[in-house]
Image (cartoon, helix red, strand yellow):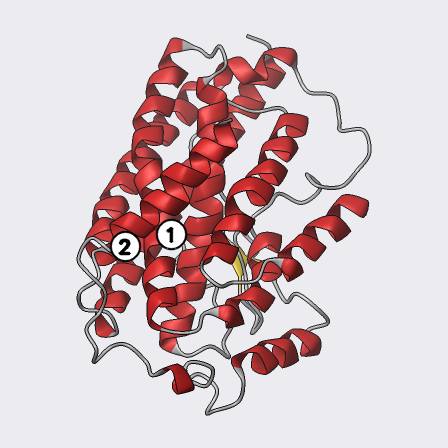
Amino acid sequence: MLFSKLFRLLVLGGAIVGSASGCAGPGQAQPAADKKADDRDGGASSDSRSAQTQDADGGTAQTQAADGGSAADGGGGGVLGW
Amino acid sequence: MMDEVRRLAGAAWAFRARVEREASTRFARLADAIPVFDPASPVPDLLRRAAGDEDRHALLCAELAAAYGSPAPASTMDVRIAPRSLGPRDAVLYEVVAACCITETESVATLATLLAEQVEPRVRTVLHEIARDEVVHGQMGWAHLAREAEMRDVSFLSAWVPSMLEGSVDEGILTSGQPAAEPDDLLLHGVLPRTRKREIFIRTLEEVVFPGLERHGVGAAPARAWLADRLAA
């Protein structure tokens, strides 16, 4: 019960909040043909780029900072919470 | 109060003070980054407000930590967690999803669970104050993801969710085996036993985070595989 309520409150509620000011104008929207290949990888598929980076790091690349926080070492990190 | 309970409760609240302070710094930075590519977004205003909330939460947590005899460290780090291979817009999306869609969502679940339990009045007051704001902090992450998914393909995130998850959970909380014994009355002081924490973490992923990501076009298969691997370890 708690979790279905959280889904509605956060995920569905968040989507409503996101649309509160309307979507970005046409100038910000990317054409569908460009969706898979934006400026992050010079045209390579984003999925393949991510997979390559992860492979190079032997899977999920994440290190913990010395203070126990998370830091990216070229891979990606996460955020510790409660 | 037992010394052990006092020590563990103090350490937990000091850790939370640090987490809240770091969230404040991160939210302020992300608030400045989003208008560059999405000037109509309502999310930057929410992030700025959230940064102020987190400063207030940090003080509340630090006061509780001090009351338990564990002063919270005052320094704050701004750790950028996005992979270096991502461009600026993708890096912002990565960080918002990791910090809000995953971590803030998990925090709301933890707070709601704690508030359903019997806790010390002073602790309950702090939990209430924080829970009220954390709902909005979770929503702003889902709001940003929804906007981005509306405008472009965000499926690249799918492969990165395991990295986000890896960094969002205490080492050892997901591993099987008998957890170390914990004092029974730790919950009174606002600290979930590890078995409850594990259960909340997993169910929040399975019932809120993964379906939420899928709803916006971010496949959750790699994240589900990560979770299955961790639970089998």
Asked whether residue A19 is in view, the answer is yes
Q: Determine the chain carrying the residue at label 1.
A: B
What residue do we see at 65% from left, 29% from top? B194
Q: Residue at 60% across / 45% down in the picture?
A: B169
Residue A22 versus residue A72: which sits nearer the camera? A22
Asked if residue B79 can be seen in this view, the reply is no
Please identify the quarter of the rendering in which residue B226 is found: bottom right
* Relative depth, front residue between B214 and B115: B214
Classify mark 1: helix, strand or loop.
helix
Question: On the rendered structure, is A48 left or right of B33?
Answer: right
Question: Residue B44 in the image: x percent, y percent?
Answer: 23, 57
Q: Residues within 10 Å of mark 2 (few under 14, many from 20)?
A: many
Label 2 element class: helix
> Looking at the picture, which amino acid does disc 2 mark?
Gly
Q: Quadrant of residue B148?
A: bottom left
Tell me what residue is drawn at x 58 percent, y 33 percent.
Answer: B200
Q: Is residue B15 above or below residue B94?
A: above
Pinpoint residue B19: horizontal percent, then vertical percent.
43, 43
Type of amino acid under label 1: Trp
Position in image of residue B135 (x %, y %)? 35, 37
| Quarter of image, res B149 | bottom left
Q: Few, some or many C-alpha atoms within 10 Å of disc 1 (few <14, some 14-19, many ≥20)?
A: many
For disc 2, the marked residue is A18
Residue B27 appears left or right of B95: left
